[in-house]
Amino acid sequence: MSSSFMQLRHLRYFTSIVDAGSFCQAAATIHVAQPALSQQIAALEAELGVALLHRSVRGVRPTREGKVFYREATSILQHVEQLRCIIRSTARKPEGAVRLGMFSALAASFACTLMEASRTMLPKVRLHLVTGDSLHMKSLITSRALDICVVLEDEPTSGVRRRPLFQQHLHLVRPPDTGEVASAVSLEELAELPLVLPTRPNTIRDALDRRFEVAGVMPNCIAEVDTFASAVSFVRAGLASAILAKGDIPDIPSHEDLRALVIDPPIHMTACLISSGDVAFAAEAVSALLIAQVGKVPHMRPLAGSEPITPPDLDSKVEALAVGE
């Protein structure tokens, strides 16, 4: 392919056609004559030597190669847009989109707090929140699909910038009105209960599997789920108990009646803020704000022996980033 042939407009044309599902609709959306649009895509396919679209009377859809091209083109266009925001942010206040990942249990109780603080302190920043299992979040950081991410770890992640935030114990969460008076449960007792556990691969599941193996017990897993919300729904329906990193369930609206029992001996997980390397100005501002907000939550206590979550100058750093100093 000639180095001068493919331009950003080709990427925009192609992604618009795939999104619209037809040349006609795409032409109306991006204000380009349909014959010219068809010509540009035909030339692109000829230059690449592959068909990118299946054409029919019902519209168009990407071929296998077209799906790959669409994914990469979308990523490139997003990076170009992000670059524009990075330059503007560096010159003035932090602005633009910041792709933030957060493990689902933390998002359930903390995401709204962070969003409200961001609207006040960083009004020109748009947070794109992605939630899920920590292992998936880490893969998104590695591929740079996320800018920053808060994950749970029982072993340090390598190959990323990493800042430990706080430590949580895993808790057994029982359905309401189960009548227990004990505040703790052993692994042996826990293994006798019907459990809903995270689907493998999963950070918490890996930690649990290792502990069960050492204790020589087999958990009674009746179901596997991918999200915190799904686990809680099983508990609320009275079908099973769950093992969650959220030790203070009453912080989550509508879940105040769920019982959280400490597992003895305790299983620790560490919440860490990670990124793949140097981050944009806006992502740096969100990182500082997130750390400041974490430090204000009583049960998110900093790790013993680690640097404080809220160093004396952190609030001023957030404010300086927000005003563009």
Image (spheres, rainbow, N blue to C red):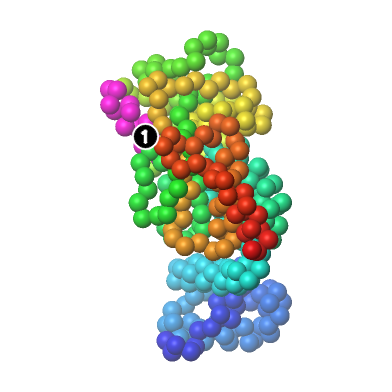
Q: Residue, x 49% and y 15% (percent of image)?
A: 183
Measuring from the top left, give residue 152's x and y in whole percent: 45, 41
Above or below 4: residue 130: above
Check if residue 214 falls in the magenta segment: yes
Q: Residue, x 34% and y 32% (percent of image)?
A: 209
Q: Quadrant of residue 59?
A: bottom right
Can residue 151 be spotted in the picture?
Answer: no
Above or below 45: residue 148: above
Can residue 142 be spotted in the picture?
Answer: yes
Measuring from the top left, give residue 55's x and y in whole percent: 56, 75
Check if residue 10 falls in the magenta segment: no
Measuring from the top left, give residue 38's x and y in whole percent: 60, 83
Image quadrant holding the N terminus, namely bottom left
Above or below 92: residue 322: above
Measuring from the top left, give residue 93's x and y in whole percent: 66, 64
Q: Residue, x 54% and y 35% (percent of image)?
A: 300
Q: Quadrant of residue 317?
A: bottom right
Q: Which residue is mark 1?
A: 207
Most extreme residue toward the front is 312
Question: What residue range appears in magenta?
Answer: 203-216
Q: What secondary structure is the stretch in magenta mostly built from?
A: helix
Q: Amino acid under label 1? A: Ala
Front residue of this view, candidates 308 and 290: 308
Q: Quadrant of residue 252?
A: top right
Above or below 107: residue 283: below
Image quadrant holding the C terminus, namely bottom right
Secondary structure beneath label 1? helix
Mark 1 packing: few (<14 Cα in 10 Å), some, or many (20+)? some
